[in-house]
Amino acid sequence: GRAPALGSEPAFIQCLATLVRDALARFERYSCVRCLHPKPDSHRRQASCPNCRFTFPAFLTRGVQTLG
């Protein structure tokens, strides 16, 4: 037999809607990869998070390269 599909459960749909809404709310904003503490654009190249002191990998602190 097959297991029941999760996609039809109201709780699953509500959870998915919450995840999508939260992800879109943070779109185009920079934040710490560990604690999700928002960082102003002017401070996004710092070596560590001022909130949790997580040291960012070098590829996250370098400037963004654009094509063309």
Image (spheres, rainbow, N blue to C red):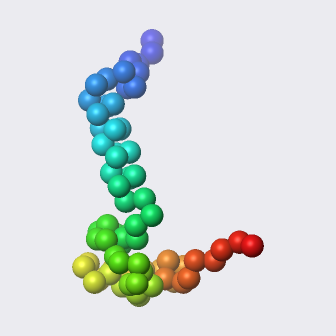
Tell me the quarter of the image containing the N terminus. Answer: top left
Closer to the camera in the image, 64 or 16? 64
Vertically, is 27 above or below 56?
A: above
Closer to the camera in the image, 40 or 45? 40
Residue at 34% across, 38% down: 17
Asked whether, in this view, residue 64 is left or right of residue 51, the answer is right
Mark count = 0
Q: Position of residue 22 (x, y in %)?
A: 33, 51
Q: In which quarter of the image is residue 49?
A: bottom left
Closer to the camera in the image, 30 or 48? 30
Q: In which quarter of the image is residue 28?
A: bottom left
Q: Position of residue 25 (x, y in %)?
A: 35, 55
Asked whether, in this view, residue 55 is left or right of residue 67, the answer is left
Asked whether, in this view, residue 19 is left or right of residue 27, the answer is left
Vertically, is 17 above or below 29?
A: above
Q: Where is residue 39 in the image (x, y as percent from the top left)?
A: 34, 76
The residue furthest right is 68
Tell me the quarter of the image containing the C terminus. Answer: bottom right
Residue at 41% across, 78% down: 41
Residue at 38% across, 45% down: 20
Residue at 38% across, 84% down: 43
Vertically, is 28 above or below 44?
A: above
Q: Where is residue 57 in the image (x, y as percent from the top left)?
A: 48, 80
The residue furthest bottom is 47
The residue furthest top is 1
